[in-house]
Amino acid sequence: MEEKKNIRRFNGAVDRGMWERLGGHRALAVWFTGLSGSGKSTIAHEVEKRLFDRGMRVKVFDGDNVRHGLCGDLSFSPEARAENTRRIAEMVKLFLENGIICLCAFISPLRADRERVRGIIGPNDFHEAFVSCPVQECERRDTKGYYRLAREGKIKNYTGISAPYEPPVSPGLLLETEKASIDECVERVMAYVLKTSAL
Ligand SMILES: Nc1ncnc2c1ncn2[C@@H]1O[C@H](COP(=O)(O)OP(=O)(O)OP(=O)(O)O)[C@@H](O)[C@H]1O
Ligand SMILES: [Mg+2]
């Protein structure tokens, strides 16, 4: 890790391994990527509930929520989207240090941005989950009414309509939400997380 001049890291007595042993599981980040309306938030929040019920330490990071606060100053231009994902990745990294399972629900449409996230979080902790759903089905769901506005040209740079989405090449998890039920998708993620987070 690059150290800045005149800024010295303070290493406390409690390290990640200690938090993980206390929690009874490893920390990891599942990065849900997919179109708006594909099911990222629905799946991530249900997984959070099921992990919580098992007494595990978990946190959901959700695109819309961080844009109100931490990233409230950023637009949706390619540069601002890159900065948005960089800040989130750095924040997730801090939570991993505390032994927390991080479920990150972000459209994160560009491969290069996701690879940057993988680089910041680290390849051993970063697990990409592709929440795959045809744009026609996302548009039919139109959970927020934004697809209609994007079609009418009232929202610019809308992923899947007027801005690109680049699917992951080889995601750790593939969740096809048009074909599988919410419960099936959630159970797939649960199995993956339980296996990967075992001490
Ligand atoms: N298998 C499935 N998994 C997840 N959601 C599903 C599935 N089948 C149907 N749905 C429905 O699809 C919608 C997904 O909406 P959700 O808000 O989770 O999407 P999102 O990916 O978080 O979108 P955004 O990027 O806009 O936040 C919900 O209405 C959900 O009930
Ligand atoms: Mg969402």
Image (cartoon, rainbow, N blue to C red):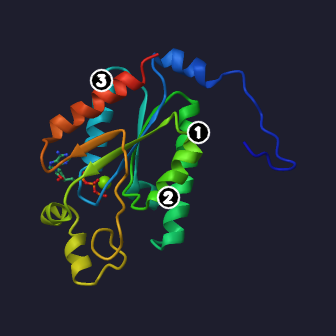
SS for dot 1: helix
Of the pair 199 and 68, the residue shown nearer to us: 199
SS for callout 2: helix
Left or right, residue 32 beside residue 137 = right
Distance of label 3 from label 1 (alpha carbons): 23 Å
Numbered label attached to residue 132: none
Residue 36: quarter of image: bottom left
Q: Is residue 74 visible?
A: no
Q: Give the residue displayed 39% in from the left and 61% down from the top.
A: 109
- The spot of residue 9 in percent (x, y) is 78, 38
**Horizontal placement of 164 versus 149: left or right?**
right
Residue 113: give its label. 2
User: Residue reaching furthest front?
Assistant: 169
Which residue is at a point 24% across and 43% down the rendered structure image? 175
Q: CA distance from mark 2 to mark 3?
A: 33 Å
Q: Earlier in the sequence, mark 3 or mark 1?
A: 3
Q: How many marks?
A: 3
| Vertical arrangement, residue 198 with respect to residue 114, above or below | above
> What's the residue type where badge 3 is placed?
Asp
Nearest-to-viewer mark from 3 and 1: 1
Between the C-alphas of marks 2 and 1, the distance is 19 Å
164 horizontally vs 93: left or right: left
Q: In the rendered image, which residue does mark 1 sit on?
A: 94
The residue carrying pointer 3 sits among few (fewer than 14), some (14 to 19) or many (20 or more) residues within 10 Å by Cα, namely: few
